[in-house]
Image (cartoon, rainbow, N blue to C red):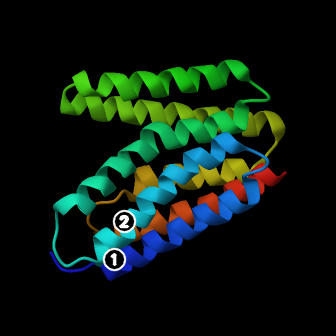
Amino acid sequence: MARQLSTSLSDGLLAWSVLYFIYHVFWVNFFACIGLGIQGAAAAVGVIRFAQSRIGGQVYDYHQMLSWLAQVMGLPLLAVGFCHKDLPIMMNLNLMIMIGVLIGSRFLASGMRQMAVQSCSGFAMLTIILICLRSWNIYGLLATALYVISGKVVGSEGKMGPFYRVDILHVGLAVANYLFTLAMSE
C-alpha cells in the first residue's frame, strides 16, 4: 500500500484538535479530556501509520486498538464529562456500558462485537444530546451532529469524489472537537 499522506495530515489535524481541547478544558473537566485524549493518541499513531509505505506491523495494530478504544472508552468518557454534574445516573450508565463492552467484547462474535461498540458509542452520543438539550448548549449539539454525520454518513472506507472518506471523517471530527471545546467552556 502506498503512503496516504493526506490521511496522515488529517490525522495530524485531529490530534491537534484534541490537544487544543485538552489545553482549554483540562481544569474544567478531567473525564472529557481523558476520553478525547484516547482519540488523540489514536490520531497521533495514525499520523505515523499512514506516513509509512508498508501496511501492517506494530504501528497498524496500535492504531487499530487505539481507534477501538476511542469508540469504546473515549466517547463514553466524553459523555461522562458532560453529565457528571447534571445527571449522575446517565454518568453511571455510560460507565457501566463502557466497562461491559470492554470486558464482554472478548467473548462476542465479530458481528456482535461491532454492534456492542456501536451501541456503546451511540448511547454516549445520545447522552451528550440529552444534556445539551437540557442546558441549551448549541455547540454541544452541533458537535454531536457533526460526529454522527462524520461517522455514520461519511464513514471511513473508500472515496467521496477526489477525497478519501477517512480524511473527511478526520476533518469532521476535528471541527467537532473544536465545537466540544466551546461547549465545555460555556
Q: Quadrant of residue 99?
A: top left
Q: Is residue 129 visible?
A: no
Q: Is residue 16 visible?
A: yes
Give residue 4's mark: none
Residue at 19% x, 27% y: name it.
Answer: 109
- Within-10-Å neighbours for mark 1: few <14, some 14–19, many 20+: few
Residue at 56% x, 51% y: name it.
Answer: 36
- Give coordinates of residue 86: x percent, y percent: 79, 28
- Give coordinates of residue 43: x percent, y percent: 44, 63
Q: Quadrant of residue 49?
A: bottom left
- Give coordinates of residue 32: x percent, y percent: 64, 44
Disc 2 and disc 1: Cα gap in Å? 22 Å
Q: Quadrant of the N terminus?
A: bottom left
Q: Of the residues shown, which amino acid type is indicated by label 1?
A: Gly
Q: Is 75 situated left or right of 105 in this image?
A: right
Q: Is 136 situated left or right of 169 in this image?
A: right
Q: Secondary structure at mark 1?
A: loop
Rendered position, 87 above or below 175 = above
Q: Of the residues shown, which amino acid type is indicated by label 2?
A: Gly
Nearer to us in this view, 111 or 142: 111
- Give coordinates of residue 83: x percent, y percent: 71, 32
Q: Secondary structure at mark 2?
A: helix
> Marks 2 and 1: which is nearer the front?
2
Residue at mark 2: 46
Nearer to us in this view, 20 or 167: 20
Q: Earlier in the sequence, mark 2 or mark 1?
A: 2
Q: Quadrant of residue 160?
A: bottom left
Rendered position, 101 above or below 78 = above
Residue projecting furthest to the front: 58
Give residue 161's mark: 1
